[in-house]
Amino acid sequence: MLTPKGLFFAPNVRFKDLRVNDPNALADALAERAEHWFFRPARTIAGSSPFAAGIVVVCFVDAAAEFTGKDTVEWLHEAVPDSAGKDARRDQKTIAESFKEDVRNGLVHHARLNRGAEFSLDIEQLLTAVQAEWQRFIARIASEPAIHQSTAERVARVFRVDFDADAAWADAP
């Protein structure tokens, strides 16, 4: 997020200050980013607008899958084990596959739900499951060197332009 004080990875972490090579610093920054820019806003609006909260959660699921090196469906199967079950509406799809095609793709590309999908799920329950899976991943960044390394590489790649922009912004007169 660009502010007059710089380009921020998380509310209190500028890109230029993000220490991707420090497992605890990276884990803390990713946790702060998720909590302040995804989980808290989604919880705040869930009661009055589950559709809007769903959009925030769907965007986070995409980001979480990318950070973990998984696709959205695989990540959902882990975060919400029931999503690996068959979708009663579509014989050859799991619930997670239908969620990606009908909910995620519909919201992101068309601002609607595709193929008659609906948010019949409890958005708070989905948010709780997504947040729990994210917290497990964050703990692994801090405790498993291989997970830290692969995540650091993904963050550096995905946000390369942001790191460069913040460095240039910091160097500007």
Image: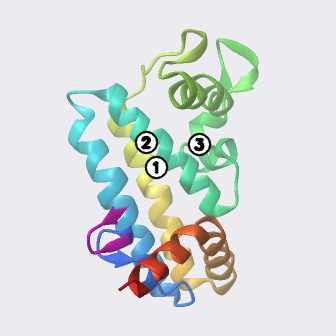
Mark 3–mark 2 distance (CA, rounded to whole Å)? 17 Å
Q: Is residue 94 magenta?
A: no
Mark 3–mark 1 distance (CA, rounded to whole Å)? 11 Å
Provide the residue span drawn in magenta.
1-7
- Crowd class of label 3 (few under 14; some 14 to 19; many from 20; radius 10 Å): few
State which quadrant residue 14 falls in.
Answer: bottom left
User: Regarding mark 1 in the picture, which secondary structure is present there?
Assistant: helix
- Crowd class of label 2 (few under 14; some 14 to 19; many from 20; radius 10 Å): many
Marker disc for residue 57: 2
The C terminus: image quadrant: bottom left
Discs 2, 1 touching: Cβ within 8 Å:
yes
Q: Which residue is mark 3?
A: 81
**Residue 162 x, y percent position in the rendering:** 52, 69
Q: In front here: 19 or 124?
A: 19
Q: Which residue is mark 1?
A: 130
What residue is rendered at 31% in x and 43% in y?
42
Residue type, mark 1 in image: Val
Marker disc for residue 109: none
Q: How many marks?
A: 3
Pair 3/2: label in front: 2
Discs 3, 2 touching: Cβ within 8 Å:
no
Residue type, mark 3 in image: Pro
